[in-house]
Image (cartoon, grey):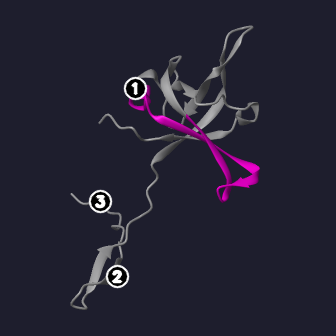
């Protein structure tokens, strides 16, 4: 049974020419995002002590502990903008890895190569969909 919605039309584009002069055609592909959005909630902490080496991240679309299993070991990237340009860009990154769940509501713990700055709290990060264990 087909759905009543119209199919998305994909356009054919010319990529180049073959040696005999005929055009090389290919389907125009849609841009694909290889990450899931995440929000940095803060550091792992108790009542009095704060552990800056472990950050808490809320991953978009993850609501329970079972869904976290897919994201274990995935890379996390915090991107920020600096004032001075280095290697042709003002954007810098801090990379980390999701280590385990935190509670039962889909929050995860992540360890970064360098501890995240306090300015990152409440900010966005990217949870990459690699390395894949599927």
Q: Quadrant of the N terminus?
A: bottom left
Give the magenta range: 67-95
Q: What residue sits 49% from the left and 21% below the top?
A: 101
Direction from residue 93 to residue 16 in the image, left or right: left
Seen as rendered, the residue at the extreme bottom is 21
At a point 25% along the width and 84% down the height, the residue shown is 18
The disc, 3 or 2, on the residue closer to the chain's N-terminal end is 3
Mark carried by residue 14? 2
Q: Label 3 crowding class (10 Å Cα cut-off): few <14, some 14-19, many 20+?
A: few
- Is residue 76 within the magenta segment? yes
Label 3 element class: loop
Residue matched to label 1? 69
Kindly report the distance in space between the C-alpha atoms of the residues bearing marks 1 and 3: 33 Å
Q: Does 13 appear above or below 119?
A: below
Query: Helix, strand or loop at disc 1?
Result: helix
The percent coordinates of residue 106 (x first, y second) are: 51, 26
Q: Position of residue 83 (x, y in %)?
A: 78, 51
**Residue 71 drawn at (x, y percent):** 43, 31
Residue 131 horizontal/vertical position (percent):
39, 38
**Could you classify mark 1 by the number of other residues whose Cα lies within 10 Å: few (under 14), some (14-19), or many (20 or more)?**
few
Q: Which residue is mark 3?
A: 3
Label 2 SS? strand
């Amino acid at each position: 049974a087909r759905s009543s919605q119209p199919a998305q039309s994909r356009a054919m584009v010319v990529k180049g020419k073959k040696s005999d002069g005929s055009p090389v055609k290919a389907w125009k592909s849609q841009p694909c995002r290889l990450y899931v959005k995440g929000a940095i909630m803060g550091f792992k902490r108790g009542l009095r002590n704060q552990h800056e080496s472990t950050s808490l991240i809320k991953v978009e679309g993850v609501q329970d502990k079972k869904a976290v299993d897919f994201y274990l070991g995935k890379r996390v990237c915090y991107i920020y903008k600096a004032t001075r340009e280095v290697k042709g860009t003002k954007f810098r990154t801090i990379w980390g890895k999701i280590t385990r769940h935190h509670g039962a509501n889909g929050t995860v713990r992540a360890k970064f190569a360098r501890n995240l700055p306090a300015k990152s709290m409440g900010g966005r990060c990217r949870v990459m969909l690699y390395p894949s264990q599927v």
